[in-house]
Image (cartoon, grey):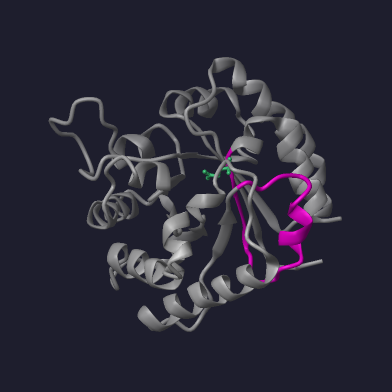
């Protein structure tokens, strides 16, 4: 099996309460042993804002890292009722942040706004999980590549530190639906994304690009056979320790 670093990133979305600490504890107990045999992987849980600080205090080991799922584009404090800044997120102990998720794009996160959010989060030394992906309509019209190109070029500035950005290809039509792209298509798209980033930002090394959309313990073997994929952004299945563990175990089978 692969010798490169593989990311398993959970996106809890709007789920979880203080009792959910048992999920991170169970995941930890599994991963504590597993990571001794399989060294090259990283587990990150992106949880609701309300749980970051609580988990940070209760979960002392830090073997599993914590992340947020969005932030306001203004970096620090400001008159933005109900919003949370990148600086607040960093101060409560998160190391990662998801930005550009399609569920936030569809409720107002424009390409330009996402660009400002990425800048704020990078300035706060957070590592970005930057989501890109086409809708079913765009796919039908064969616009996948042009959409991905526009999302990458529009939200990433040449000055941004690409080593701090994990790109997550999440076809919108795959999120929460159980439908995943076929292997051939995934290879083509991952090669396109990697080439596009290298070309646009004059970069020699390959960027980290992960896949998200209906990943589960069964279909993970399909993804594991694609060397271009550097990890996974897992929504629904990450809200259960058993399902999350199945994905990790089956990836290495
Ligand atoms: P899903 O969600 O795994 O439930 O499809 C993925 C995501 O939205 O990041």
Left or right: where 79 falls relative to 252: left
- Depth order, front residue of 35/204: 204
Residue 84, position as x, y percentages in the image: 29, 33
Q: Residue furthest top?
A: 19
Q: Residue furthest right?
A: 253
Q: Can residue 132 be spotted in the picture?
A: no
Q: Residue furthest left?
A: 79
Residue 131, position as x, y percentages in the image: 44, 54
Left or right: where 177 falls relative to 127: right
Please report the residue visible at 52 percent of the width from the left and 79 percent of the height from the top: 205
Q: In which quarter of the view is residue 181 placed?
A: bottom right
- Depth order, front residue of 181/156: 181
Residue 166, position as x, y percentages in the image: 49, 59
- Depth order, front residue of 86/185: 185
Q: Is residue 23 magenta?
A: no
Q: Is residue 79 above or below residue 112?
A: above
Quadrant of the frame with the C terminus: bottom right
Please report the residue visible at 64 percent of the width from the left and 55 percent of the height from the top: 180
Magenta-highlighted residues: 214-235
Q: Is residue 68 above or below residue 59?
A: below
Q: Can residue 105 be spotted in the picture?
A: yes
Quadrant of the frame with the N terminus: bottom right
Q: Is residue 217 magenta?
A: yes
Q: In which quarter of the view is residue 23 placed?
A: top right
Left or right: where 110 falls relative to 43: left
Residue 108, position as x, y percentages in the image: 27, 43
Q: Is residue 111 above or below residue 162?
A: above
- Depth order, front residue of 157/64: 157
Please report the residue visible at 28 percent of the width from the left and 66 percent of the height from the top: 154
Q: In which quarter of the view is residue 80 placed?
A: top left
């Amino acid at each position: 099996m692969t010798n490169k670093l593989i990311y398993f990133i959970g996106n809890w979305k709007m789920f979880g309460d203080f009792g959910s600490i048992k999920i991170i504890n169970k995941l930890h107990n599994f991963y504590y042993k597993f990571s001794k045999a399989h060294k090259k992987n990283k587990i990150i849980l992106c949880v609701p804002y309300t749980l970051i600080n609580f988990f940070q205090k209760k979960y002392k080991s830090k073997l599993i890292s914590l992340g947020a799922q969005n932030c306001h584009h203004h970096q620090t404090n400001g008159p933005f009722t109900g919003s949370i800044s990148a600086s607040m997120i960093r101060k409560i102990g998160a190391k990662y942040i998801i930005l550009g998720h399609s569920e936030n794009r569809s409720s107002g996160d424009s390409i330009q706004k996402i660009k400002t959010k990425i800048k704020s989060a990078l300035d706060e030394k957070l590592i970005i999980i930057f989501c890109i992906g086409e809708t079913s309509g765009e796919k039908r019209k064969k616009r996948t590549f042009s959409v991905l190109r526009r999302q990458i070029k529009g939200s990433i500035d040449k000055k941004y530190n690409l080593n701090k950005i994990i790109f997550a290809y999440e076809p919108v039509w795959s999120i929460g639906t159980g439908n995943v792209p076929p292997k051939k298509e995934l290879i083509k798209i991952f090669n396109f994304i990697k080439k596009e980033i290298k070309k646009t930002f004059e970069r020699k090394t390959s960027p980290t690009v992960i896949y998200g959309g209906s990943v589960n313990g069964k279909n993970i073997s399909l993804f594991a056979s694609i060397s271009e994929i550097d990890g996974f952004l897992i929504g629904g299945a990450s809200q259960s320790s058993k399902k999350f563990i199945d994905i990790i175990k089956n990836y290495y089978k």
